[in-house]
Image: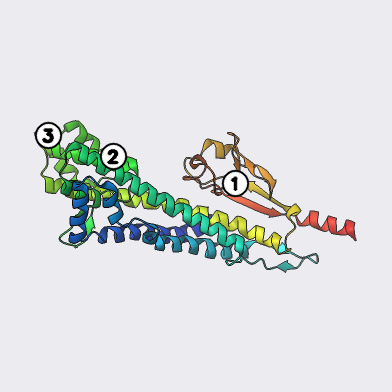
């Protein structure tokens, strides 16, 4: 059976796993940097109430996300080259002209720098803000500094030697879900434990253990809770990595696709008057109602699409768009070059 995946979707499938792996690797390196000596320093800063110093010791900065930077650049560059090869451009005689994608083009380089910088800046700031809130709340509850630090950075798995769990790399809602699950499992709160059993990203292998504790009205041992929450963390982080990888890969490829047409215009191979773009139908199971209403909207290349809420959208995932129009968006745009109009114009000038 023929696949309904477009060439653009296939490129997303190809590059998003690389972006996902780079995202996870960045946080693996940050956690790996928390050696016993480093953990001792972090605990000491928390004990002093110096939250900012404790966060700084973790090294959550642009350098930590260098691999993610490279993965996004690779998707942009290789994806742009692949999509440019699929654009059909013809000269006045009707002969096909090759459209190239210049990865060293100054505008392309600036777009790529901005895309990478926005992602890394957003990620580092969010990670630090989450730590800031969680560590401050730990101090306010009166938790000891070591417990507060370990819940943030995770604990070392003796079998693998790797630090697991913690909430570095999670979103705010994910951290709160994890904190509630830990509190409920340790305290034996039956309602909270039942809520844990409804979590989509839990490890179901522990369900029988949790259900037994609920039926007996007991709390779980801390070492069991550490294992349960550690597996929950792994699944939460991987889920977030999937979402970010898909979103950022789509953004990089959509930008590269639009940039390929712009470079064709800049080189003189394409006349901008002959280019239109049409908003297509997404294959997503639950498309945004606004984007669904835009299907079939056609505008000149240099004009934006107009969403029902009035948002001007140059193309899906264009820089500066609000999150309500980007996160999870999988809408395609088709660029069309009107060769008939170009031929008529040339004959009129002849």
* Local secondary structure at mark 3: helix
Q: Which residue is mark 2?
A: 176
* Local secondary structure at mark 2: helix
- Marks 1 and 2: in contact by CB < 8 Å? no
Residue 57 location in percent, x, y? 28, 56
How far apart marks 3 and 1 lie (CA) works out to 52 Å
**Horizontal side of residue 248 vs 334, given as left or right:** left
Sequence-first disc among 3 and 1:
3
The crowding category of the residue bearing disc 2, from other C-alpha atoms within 10 Å (few below 14, some 14 to 19, many at least 20), is some
Q: Is residue 205 visible?
A: no
- Marks 2 and 3: in contact by CB < 8 Å? no
Residue 295 location in percent, x, y? 61, 41
Corner quadrant of residue 215: top left
User: Vertically, is 186 above or below 339?
Assistant: above
Q: Which residue is mark 3?
A: 215
* Local secondary structure at mark 1: loop
How far apart marks 2 and 1 lie (CA) works out to 37 Å
Corner quadrant of residue 156: bottom left
**Horizontal side of residue 162 vs 66, given as left or right:** left
**Horizontal side of residue 187 vs 119, given as left or right:** left
Q: Nearer the viewer, mark 3 or mark 2?
A: 2
Q: Is residue 313 visible?
A: yes
Q: Which label number is shown at residue 280? A: 1
Residue nearest the observer in this picture, 225 or 175: 175
């Amino acid at each position: 059976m023929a696949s309904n995946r477009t060439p653009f979707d296939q490129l997303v499938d190809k590059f998003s796993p690389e972006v996902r792996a780079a995202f996870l690797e960045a946080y693996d390196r940050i956690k790996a940097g928390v050696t016993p000596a480093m953990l001792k320093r972090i605990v000491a800063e928390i004990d002093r109430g110096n939250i900012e110093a404790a966060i700084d010791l973790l090294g959550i900065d642009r350098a930590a996300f260098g691999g993610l930077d490279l993965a996004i650049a690779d998707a942009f560059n290789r994806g742009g080259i692949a999509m440019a090869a699929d654009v059909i451009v013809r000269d006045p005689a009707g002969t096909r002209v090759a459209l190239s994608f210049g990865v060293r083009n100054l505008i392309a380089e600036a777009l790529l720098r901005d895309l990478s910088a926005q992602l890394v800046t957003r990620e580092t700031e969010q990670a630090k803000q989450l730590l800031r809130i969680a560590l401050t709340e730990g101090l306010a509850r009166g938790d000891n500094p070591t417990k507060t630090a370990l819940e943030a950075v995770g604990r070392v798995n003796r079998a693998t030697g790797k630090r697991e769990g913690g909430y570095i790399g999670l979103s705010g809602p994910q951290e709160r879900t994890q904190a509630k699950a830990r509190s409920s499992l340790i305290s034996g709160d039956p309602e909270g434990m039942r809520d844990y059993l409804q979590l989509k990203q839990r490890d179901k292998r522990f369900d029988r253990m949790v259900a037994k504790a609920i039926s007996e009205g007991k709390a779980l041992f801390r070492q069991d809770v550490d294992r349960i929450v550690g597996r929950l963390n792994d699944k939460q982080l991987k889920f977030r990595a999937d979402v970010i990888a898909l979103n950022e890969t789509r953004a990089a490829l959509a930008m590269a696709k639009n940039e390929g047409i712009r470079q064709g215009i800049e080189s003189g191979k394409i006349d901008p008057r002959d280019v239109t773009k049409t908003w297509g139908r997404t294959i997503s199971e639950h498309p945004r109602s606004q984007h669904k209403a835009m299907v079939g909207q056609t505008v000149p290349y240099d004009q934006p699409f107009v969403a029902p809420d009035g948002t001007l959208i140059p193309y899906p995932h264009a820089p500066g768009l609000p999150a309500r129009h980007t996160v999870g968006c999988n809408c395609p745009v088709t660029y069309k070059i009107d060769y008939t109009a170009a031929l008529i114009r040339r004959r009129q000038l002849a």
